[in-house]
Amino acid sequence: MRILSVLLIFILASCEPPPSGEQPIDYILGVKDSGLFRGLDVGASRNAVAAKEAEHIVHQMPDELTCRIPLDLKDSAFYDITYNFDEEGLRVIELDIFPASNPVKQDLYNNFKAHYDRRFGQSSEDDGFTMWTTRSHRGTAIEVSMVDESAEIGRPYLSVNFYEYNE
């Protein structure tokens, strides 16, 4: 019975929102981990990504893993991450964030922009579309784009994509 109680505490703790001192963007991006996103880099193996995100995987195919992670259980905000692979490993990361309200969405947008402006340099921005470019650890180009797609879908929604491409 005691073991069951301890196990239940660990399960409930893993479902909690980010710690009070941690910003939602830090929690989403895993900024405490190294790597491009949540401790992962472009080129990572499917097995490495699956191991890192094991508790959040909701759908998987040979070339794709989809994860769902709640931001805050009390207001039903969540985000989905889709990892796409090719024969060389992780190639595309699609992050879809569904905040509970427009003010929360705008705050996340501003925080993401500030974070990536610090990390990758000043972004280009045009009518809700923001973009940065950087290099992967293996020297390929990576485009990071963020789009506020709230108007198109009729609810607060941000899309952040990481795409590796050859120049």
Image (cartoon, rainbow, N blue to C red):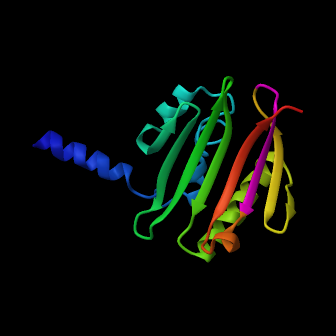
Q: Main secondary structure of the magenta part?
A: strand
The quarter of the rendered structure image containing the N terminus is: top left
x and y, in percent, of residue 86 in the image: 67, 28
Residue 67 inside the magenta-drawn segment: no
Which residue: 74% across, 41% down?
163
Task: Using the rendered view, name the quadrant where residue 75 is placed.
Answer: bottom left
Which residue: 64% across, 42% down?
37
Q: Is residue 45 left or right of residue 14?
A: right
Residue 111 vs 90, above or below: the answer is below
**Can the viewer see residue 18?**
no
Q: Is residue 162 left or right of residue 13?
A: right
Q: Which residue extends farthest left?
A: 1
Name the one closer to the observer, 33 or 163. Answer: 163
Which residue: 77% across, 25% down?
138
Q: How many marks?
A: 0
Q: Is residue 23 left or right of residue 152?
A: left
Which residue: 63% across, 37% down?
84
Q: Is residue 166 left or right of residue 101?
A: right
The quarter of the rendered structure image containing the C terminus is: top right
x and y, in percent, of residue 115 in the image: 72, 54
Residue 82 vs 113, above or below: the answer is above
x and y, in percent, of residue 139 in the image: 82, 27
**Can the viewer see residue 39?**
yes
x and y, in percent, of residue 99 in the image: 56, 67
Q: Report the span colored magenta.
A: 138-147
